[in-house]
Amino acid sequence: MPSIMNVLKDDFLSAILLVGGSLYALILVFIIFYHGVFRLFKRKDH
Amino acid sequence: MIRISNIQLFILILLFEVGSTTLFALGIGAKQDAWIVIVLATLIGLILLWVYTEFPNRYPDQNFSEILEHLLGKKLAAPLLILFGLYFFSQASHNFFEFGAMIKLTTLPETPLIVLLYLFIIVLIYILHLGFEVLGRTAEILTPYVILFLLLIYTFTVLSGEFEITELQPVLGDGIEPVIAELHPVVAFPFGEMVVFLMFWHYAAKPQSIRKIAFLAVGLSAFLLTLSLIVMVVVLGTELAGKAEIPLLEVILVINIADIITNLDSVAVFIMFIGGFYKTALHFWAFCLAMTWVYKGTSPKRLLTIVGLIFPLFTVYRFPAFLDQRLIGDELGIYSILIFAFLPILLLVIMFIKKENGSSN
């Protein structure tokens, strides 16, 4: 995996895509965990 | 309302997959086992395709922007659409430059690259201005020739006596490790690139048959790619196939049947140009759609013209030379494709969770 600085130096668009895409993937993973766990808790309440 | 038929969708997927991939010897790092890499990558690609075709199954009449808004809400959907748009733009510029440079390299060495790129983009803007169906219909006319020429090339190489099937042996001579190591670039390119079709599923006249059509098209293109790679390895050998700038062209230059059928390089240029044109057009249209959806515009045509006219300048600025493009594509492009190809899996999980939450409520 190329380092972020090298990516920025070589190609700005790729850097945006790599950083932006990874951050967004993390957000989606967070949403999945948040809603998944939330659902589990809700089931326990029942 | 723009609608494309099943055959047009099938042909667009086929051209998209076979397109620029004929330029590369995919998975050649695994040497004679490169064809096994393609077969394995196809299996992973089909799983990804199942994910991509699940969206139109669940939301048959909605476009990707509406699906994202439903899944994530307006605030989270817009940045994702912008990121997808930039990714399509990046891929379009890769394909665009690749084919301009390839034509300069093979047929028009004296013409400045920027002139070739402007000719290319003017045709592209014109076709897309006429609508997505026109792109589908032109593909429908041209694809039989592409497939015919590809099959003719394979037949001629066999007939010209340069076909050394023993080049494929020993099968898995170095074990499975080189095959696994080469797998991720091939999963990304061309199978992960199918993510662009998420933007076009709503154009399909029969949403219920999208999955069947897409699986058939990707299956056939994987077969053609495997065949193409086997021919490259068998005719050129693993060393030359790995080092040649355009392996398919080298294969074609080998063809010589009784000094009559020879110098068929224009056939190779035809195949590559058509494939490259459709890959660029689909990525570019996807970019225009994504950006129009972000600012809630009615038609992407104005954006198409404005960005289209600047596009060749941007591409030449981004890639100073052919090698720069190859380097950026190999080192960084593969990872960005992988990220954006796998994002829909997370979206699908969110879709399942939302459905579960909805039904439990």
Image (tube, coloured by chain):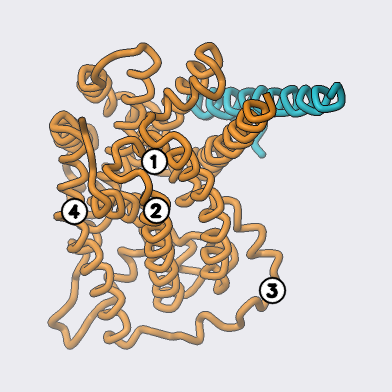
* N-term mark: 3 or 4: 4
Residue B215, given in percent of the width and then of the height, sits at: 43, 57
* N-term mark: 2 or 4: 4
Chain A colour as displayed: cyan
As drawn, the chain in orange is B
Mark identifier at residue B197: 1
Mark 2 crowd level (few <14, some 14–19, many ≥20, 10 Å Cα): many
The residue positioned 23% from the left and 38% from the top of the image is: B3
Q: Which residue is mark 4?
A: B140
Label 1 to label 2: alpha-carbon separation: 10 Å
Q: Amino acid at mark 3?
A: Asp
Q: Are marks 3 and 4 on the same chain?
A: yes
Asked whether disc 3 touches disc 4, contact meaning CB atoms under 8 Å apart, the reply is no
Residue B233, given in percent of the width and then of the height, sits at: 46, 73
Q: Which residue is mark 2?
A: B214
Mark identifier at residue B174: 3
Q: Amino acid at mark 1?
A: Phe
Residue B211, given in percent of the width and then of the height, sits at: 42, 51
Q: Are marks 4 and 1 on the same chain?
A: yes
Q: Amino acid at mark 2?
A: Ala
Most foreground residue, B17 or B49: B49
